[in-house]
Amino acid sequence: MIGATCGVIGCIQVTEVIKYIVKMESFLENKLLLWDGLNAKIDEIELERNPSCEDCGWK
């Protein structure tokens, strides 16, 4: 179970890095990916920048 979860997450990460390097549109840009390894489910949550946040706000 742990090995499969690591494999899935690793593949997603590598895919996103390759998309970033070749300047393709990112599947996960401005999204939070939630992986439920027990039930093999993936959920996404749309994220917005908070302009007043020191970490994610516009600088």
Image (tube, rainbow, N blue to C red):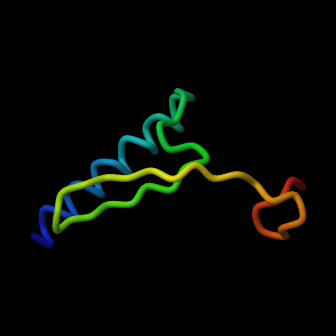
Relative vertical location of residue 56 with respect to residue 17 in this rendering, above or below: below
Q: Residue at x 30, y 57 (%)?
A: 9
Q: Residue furthest left?
A: 1
Q: Nearer the viewer, residue 34 or 22?
A: 34
Relative vertical location of residue 7 with respect to residue 15 in this rendering, above or below: below
Q: Residue at x 80, y 59 (%)?
A: 50
In the rendered view, does 43 fall on the left or right side of 6? Answer: right
Q: Residue at x 87, y 58 (%)?
A: 51
> Residue 15 occupies which quadrant of the picture?
top left
In percent of width and height, residue 28 lies at 50, 44
In percent of width and height, residue 32 lies at 51, 56
How many labels, in total?
0
> Residue 25 occupies which quadrant of the picture?
top right
In percent of width and height, residue 48 lies at 71, 51
Q: Residue at x 76, y 54 (%)?
A: 49
In the rendered view, does 24 fall on the left or right side of 57? Answer: left
Q: Nearer the viewer, residue 55 or 49?
A: 49
Q: Quadrant of the C terminus?
A: bottom right
In the rendered view, does 7 fall on the left or right side of 30? Answer: left
Relative vertical location of residue 6 with respect to residue 25 in this rendering, above or below: below
Q: Quadrant of the N terminus?
A: bottom left
Relative vertical location of residue 42 with respect to residue 23 in this rendering, above or below: below
